[in-house]
C-alpha cells in the first residue's frame, strides 16, 4: 500500500478538502505539511459542513492527524478551530491531533506586519493578512519562536528580545507602535499549557507509523502555482506548496510522499492578485463564479474565473511528479454550449508550451484556445462513467491527453460520495 500526497495543481481552491476527506477513509494518518491558517478546506459530510483552515481534514474522520514542522502555526487560531469543531461534535484531543514540536509560531506581531505592509503597498500581493509571510521570514531568519520553546520560560524571554530587535525597526518604519515584549511573553505563557499537550516529535511518530505498515495521507494547502519557487512570483504564498515539500515538511524523508494525486478543477480560478492568462470577464466567467460558488473559504473573497489552462496544469504535473489527477467541479460546466481549453501561449510572436518565469512575460502572454462542444445534460452526482454525457467524457479524456496525466478520480459535487473512482491511489 502506498502513501498518498494530495496537492492542488492550480492556484488553490481546487476542491482538495472533499478529496482529502474522502481519501481519509483509506488512510491511517493524515498530515498537513506546509502553509498556515491562510488555507481553507470545506468538508461536506451529510448535512454537516466543516470549514477547516489549519487542522488536517482527517480530524473529522477521527483519524490520527499531524500538523507537521513545515506549517507555521497561530496557536490562538488553533485553539479557536479546535473549539469550533468541538461545537460541531468533533472532540479533538492529543490522542487525535499531533503538533510538531519544531513547528514555528505565528504571533500577533506577524499579523500586524502583514496587514501594514499590504495596506502600504502600491502593488499589492493580495495576502490574507494573517501573518503567514512574516512568520516564514522569521523562520528562515533563524529568529522564530517554535512550539517547543514554550516549555522554557527563560529561553523564551531571550528569544522574544531577539525577535523584537528585528521587528521594532520594521514597525517604526510602518508607523506601528513598538511591541510590548512582556505582554507577548505573558500571552505565550498563558497559552502554552493549552498547546503543549499536542506537541511531540512528529517525525518520530511518522517514522514509526510507516515502519508499522500504516498508510499516510499528506494534505497540501494552496496550489502548486502559488509555490514560492515555482509559482507566479511574487504573487505567491510564502511556502513551498509542491509535493516534494511533503517530505521536508513532515520529516518523513523523500520516499514518504508516495503516490502524488493532483487536484485539478475543470476550469481555472484564482484568488488575489497576479497573472491569470485564461481569466474571463464575460457572462461565462460570471456563470463559473456564481454556479461554482467561487468564494474563498478563509477570506470570503470572490475568485477570478477562467477557462481550463492545460499549459499550467501540465507544468504542475512535471513539477510535482503527479501520478494521477482528481478532476473536480465538472458539473459546473453543465449547460455551456461551447468549452475552451488553453493549449499554448503566444508571447510577442512566439509560441510557448510553458509559463515563463518573468512577471512581465507572464502578464503579456495570450492564450491559444482549442474549442470543444459542451453538453446540456447534468453531471451532478454522477458516480460512474456511464452516468456522464458523451461530451463530458470527451472533455475529461482531452484534459488527460493535454496535461500528460490520467484521471484517477472525477468529482461531480461537494458531497463526499459523488465521486467517480477510476483507480484507488492507495492501491497504486
Image (tube, grey):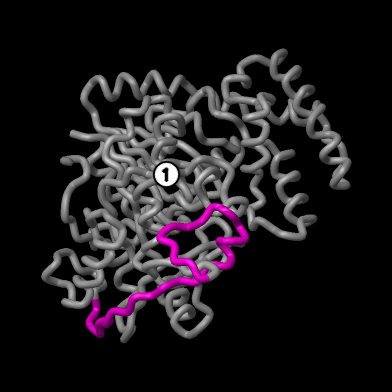
Q: What is the quadrant of the N terminus in the image? A: top left
Q: Residue at x 26, y 40 (%)?
A: 259
Extreme-left residue of the structure = 386
Task: Give the quadrant of residue 195.
Answer: top right
Query: In the figure, is residue 130 to the left or right of 168?
Result: left
As rendered, which of 290 and 271 lies closer to the eye? 271
Task: Give the quadrant of residue 313.
Answer: bottom left
Question: What range is drawn magenta here?
Answer: 349-378
Q: Is residue 366 above or below residue 5?
A: below
As rendered, which of 259 and 190 lies closer to the eye? 259
Q: Residue at x 76, y 56 (%)?
A: 121
Q: Position of residue 416 (x, y in %)?
A: 28, 57
Q: Residue at x 38, y 53 (%)?
A: 16
Asked if one can make out residue 256 in the rendered structure from this viewpoint, the answer is yes
As rendered, which of 144 and 198 lies closer to the eye? 144
Q: Position of residue 386 (x, y in %)?
A: 11, 70
Q: Position of residue 346 (x, y in %)?
A: 48, 69
Amino acid at each position: 500500500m502506498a502513501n498518498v500526497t494530495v496537492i492542488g495543481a492550480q492556484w488553490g481552491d481546487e476542491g482538495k478538502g472533499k478529496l482529502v476527506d474522502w481519501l481519509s477513509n483509506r488512510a491511517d494518518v493524515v498530515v498537513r505539511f506546509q502553509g498556515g491558517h491562510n488555507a481553507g478546506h470545506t468538508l461536506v459530510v451529510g448535512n454537516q459542513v466543516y470549514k477547516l483552515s489549519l487542522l488536517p481534514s482527517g480530524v473529522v474522520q477521527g483519524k490520527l492527524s499531524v500538523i507537521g514542522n513545515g506549517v507555521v502555526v497561530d496557536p490562538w487560531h488553533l485553539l479557536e478551530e479546535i473549539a469550533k469543531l468541538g461545537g460541531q461534535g468533533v472532540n479533538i484531543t492529543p490522542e487525535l491531533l499531533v503538533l510538531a514540536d519544531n513547528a514555528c509560531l505565528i504571533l500577533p506581531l506577524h499579523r500586524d506586519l502583514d496587514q501594514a505592509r499590504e495596506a502600504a503597498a502600491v502593488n499589492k500581493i493580495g495576502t490574507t493578512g494573517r501573518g503567514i509571510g512574516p512568520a516564514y521570514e522569521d523562520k528562515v531568519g533563524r529568529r522564530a519562536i517554535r512550539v517547543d520553546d514554550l516549555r522554557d520560560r527563560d529561553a523564551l524571554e531571550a528569544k522574544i528580545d531577539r525577535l523584537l530587535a528585528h521587528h521594532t525597526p520594521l514597525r517604526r518604519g510602518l508607523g506601528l507602535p513598538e511591541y510590548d515584549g512582556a505582554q507577548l511573553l505573558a500571552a505565550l505563557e498563558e497559552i502554552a499549557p493549552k498547546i503543549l499537550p499536542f506537541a511531540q516529535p512528529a517525525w518520530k511518530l511518522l517514522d514509526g507509523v510507516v515502519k508499522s505498515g500504516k498508510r499516510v495521507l499528506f494534505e497540501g494547502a494552496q496550489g502548486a502555482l502559488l509555490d514560492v519557487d515555482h509559482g507566479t512570483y511574487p504573487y505567491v504564498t510564502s511556502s513551498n506548496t509542491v509535493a516534494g515539500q511533503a517530505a521536508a515538511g513532515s520529516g518523513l524523508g523523500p520516499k514518504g510522499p508516495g503516490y502524488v494525486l493532483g487536484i485539478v478543477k475543470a476550469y481555472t480560478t484564482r484568488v488575489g492578485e497576479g497573472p491569470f492568462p485564461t481569466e474571463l470577464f464575460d457572462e461565462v466567467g460570471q456563470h463559473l463564479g456564481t454556479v461554482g460558488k467561487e468564494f474563498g473559504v478563509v477570506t470570503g473573497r470572490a475568485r477570478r474565473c477562467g477557462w481550463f489552462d492545460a499549459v499550467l496544469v501540465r507544468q504542475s504535473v512535471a513539477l510535482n511528479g503527479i501520478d494521477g489527477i482528481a478532476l473536480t467541479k465538472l458539473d459546473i460546466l453543465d449547460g455551456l454550449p461551447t468549452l475552451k481549453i488553453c493549449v499554448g501561449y503566444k508571447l510577442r510572436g512566439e509560441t510557448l508550451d510553458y509559463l515563463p518565469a518573468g512577471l512581465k512575460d507572464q502578464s503579456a502572454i495570450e492564450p491559444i484556445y482549442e474549442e470543444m462542444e459542451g453538453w446540456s445534460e447534468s453531471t451532478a452526482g454522477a458516480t460512474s462513467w456511464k452516468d456522464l454525457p458523451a461530451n463530458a467524457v470527451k472533455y475529461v479524456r482531452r484534459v488527460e491527453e493535454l496535461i500528460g496525466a490520467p484521471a484517477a478520480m472525477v468529482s461531480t459535487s461537494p458531497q463526499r460520495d459523488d465521486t467517480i473512482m477510476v483507480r484507488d491511489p492507495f492501491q497504486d
